[in-house]
Amino acid sequence: EILMTQSPATLSVSPGESVTLSCRATQSVGTNLAWHQQQPGQAPRLLIYSASSRAPGIPARFSGSGSGTEFTLTISSLQSEDFAVYYCQQYNDWPPMHSFGQGTKLEIK
Amino acid sequence: QEQLVESGGDLVKPGGSLRLSCAASGFSFSDYYMSWVRQVPGKGLEWIAYIDKPGNTVYYADSVKGRFTMSRDNAQNSVFLQLNSLRADDTAIYYCTRRNYNDQWGQGTLVTVSS
């Protein structure tokens, strides 16, 4: 089973700043890595797939990078609506387990 | 527009059963793998089941294997999750999702298992 670990658990940042979130897999997932954002009381939504491809409608300030076991999500010039919980998810394994990281909460400083 | 709408969540006693439904619209449903993902309120996301396009093959997380059954009806553009032998730790919001990287999410349906 592939385990996903995100760091840090919580990040306090001021609006307008940039931030980088990390996600690590216990074994290589290639670039089969997605990032999801969840606002309070809402369903998650896809931000990034294939490690670095933005989903339709996602602003350019969101960017993903990495391959293998190390991945990052960078959000530049944080807007108020970006303060949320972010989850990484691998989808490389077969049979599928499609494990998620435990999440990183981005909060206003 | 593309949409997934779950229904069927309820309060059920331990050991009970429930059937969740997810209705898809706005896209060619039979062209996509579908999944169920759950979330204990205030906690993280857990993938629990995945079905192939024709509905012939389903994979389950160990936590639900043998108790939950996922199916689909491509003529009705719907996917289902039958929950049996429910336990308190099955209490969660259940989301229907599309594709292996979950590019579409429903709004979720709450299942509460309590006596």
Image (cartoon, coloured by chain):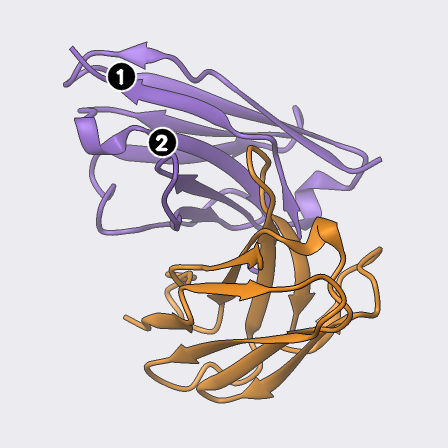
Chain colours: A orange, B purple
Q: Which residue is mark 2?
A: B92
The residue type indicated by label 1 comes to: Ser
Query: On the rendered image, what quadrant is the N terminus of chain A found in?
Result: bottom left
Label 1 is found on which chain of the structure? B
Distance, label 1 to label 2, CA atoms, is: 14 Å
> Within 10 Å of the Cα at label 2, are there few (<14), some (14-19), or many (20+) other Cα atoms?
many
Disc 2 marks a residue whose amino acid type is Ala
Q: Residues within 10 Å of mark 1 (few under 14, many from 20)?
A: some
Where in the figure is residue A51, as x and y percent of width and height?
A: 62, 77
Residue occupying the point 75% across, 73% down: A76
First of labels 1, 2 by sequence position: 1
A94 relative to B76 in the view: left or right: left
Left or right: B112 with respect to A7?
left
Q: Which residue is mark 1?
A: B17
Q: Where residue A50 is drawn, which disc sits there? A: none
Residue A101 picture location, percent across and down: 41, 64
Q: Please state if A77 lies on the left or on the right of B36 as rendered.
A: right
- Residue visible at 60% across and 43% down? A39
